[in-house]
């Protein structure tokens, strides 16, 4: 599969702060994976109980805290935005985390081409871009094909946790996952592990209500 022509992310430029640039120069090679062949999670996350993939880690605030609170799990952060990955790299260094790896790639392309079926224990999709206008809906990452691919890549009993602060997108997510018989689940309470990101804070300030979903592969 080629990279999707309908990008689910915005191109926001690569301008970084000095600290972010330095972190990229000094540490990117130690914490990132350059994807050339199918990923071998046994080798990437040695002795970790589970592999969790975060799609669209943004500035990484939530990712770093989640990974810090569960050192027994390996976290793979997949993001296209370079300054966001650099910000997460700074947090990894500051908190001395050894259970996160970073990939700069389109998560759909990565999942489809470089991740084995039945190999991911969990996926976090926190505040995916809502693409609110009708003509933009095709850019939403949650589509029928995405749900089918998630079903293939998760282990049996694997889960996907999704949070959104955009009610029409919450309805869309619910409809798409309910339509796929590989999944059970639905709306859940906000889990303790999901810390507040800057993006979520902005939504809350605007009065948006946040919905959390957890779907489990049957
Ligand atoms: C609205 S932000 C939310 C960021 C973060 N999860 C949070 O809660 O603050 C969505 C992020 O997903 C990333 N993204 C969207 N589609 C993606 C894709 N196909 N592959 C990788 N990253 C993607 C965007 O670049 C953006 O940083």
Image (tube, rainbow, N blue to C red):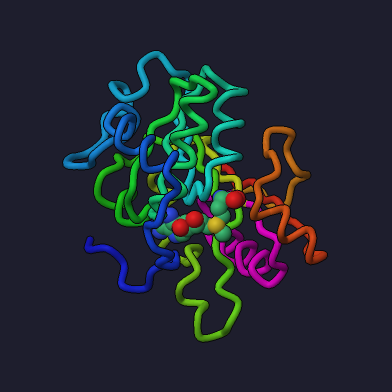
Q: Is residue 143 above or below residue 198?
A: below
Residue sitting at 28 percent across and 35 percent down? 33
Residue at 43% x, 65% y is 12
Q: Residue furthest right?
A: 207
| Image quarter of the C terminus | top right
Number of numbered discs on residues? 0
44, 120: nearer the viewer: 44
Would residue 139 be visible to someone looking at this image? yes
List x then y, in percent, for residue 69: 62, 23
Farthest left residue? 36
Residue 114, given in percent of the width and then of the height, sits at 26, 44
The reply, left or right, for residue 143 in relation to residue 196 is: left
Where residue 113 sits: x, y (%)?
25, 50
At which x and y percent is residue 84? Answer: 47, 48
Frontmost residue, 191 versus 67: 67
Vertical position of residue 30 compared to residue 36: above or below? above
Does residue 218 appear anywhere in the picture?
A: no
- Residue at the (60%, 77%) spot, across then down: 132
27 within the magenta span = no
Q: Which residues are magenta?
A: 163-183
Residue 165 belongs to the span the image colors magenta: yes
Q: Quadrant of residue 146?
A: bottom left
Horizontally, is 34 left or right of 192 in the view? left
* Quadrant of the snapshot with the N terminus: bottom left
């Amino acid at each position: 599969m080629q990279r999707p022509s309908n990008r689910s992310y915005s191109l926001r430029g690569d301008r970084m702060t000095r600290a972010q640039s330095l972190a990229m120069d000094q540490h990117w090679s130690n914490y990132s994976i350059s994807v050339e062949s199918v990923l071998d999670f046994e080798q990437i996350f040695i002795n970790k109980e589970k592999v969790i993939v975060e799609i669209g880690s943004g500035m990484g605030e939530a990712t770093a805290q989640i990974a810090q609170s569960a050192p027994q799990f390996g976290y793979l952060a997949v993001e296209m935005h370079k300054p966001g990955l650099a910000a997460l790299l700074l947090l990894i260094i500051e908190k001395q985390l050894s259970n996160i790896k970073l990939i700069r790639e389109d998560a759909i392309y990565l999942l489809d081409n470089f991740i084995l079926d039945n190999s991911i224990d969990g996926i976090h999709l926190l505040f995916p871009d809502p693409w609110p206008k009708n003509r933009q809906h095709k850019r939403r990452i949650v589509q029928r094909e995405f749900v089918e691919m998630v079903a293939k890549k998760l282990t049996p009993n694997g889960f996907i946790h999704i949070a959104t602060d955009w009610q029409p997108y919450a309805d869309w997510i619910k409809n798409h996952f309910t339509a796929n018989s590989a999944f059970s689940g639905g709306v859940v309470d906000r889990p303790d592990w999901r810390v507040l990101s800057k993006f979520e804070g902005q939504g809350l300030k605007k009065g948006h209500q946040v919905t959390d979903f957890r779907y489990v592969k049957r």
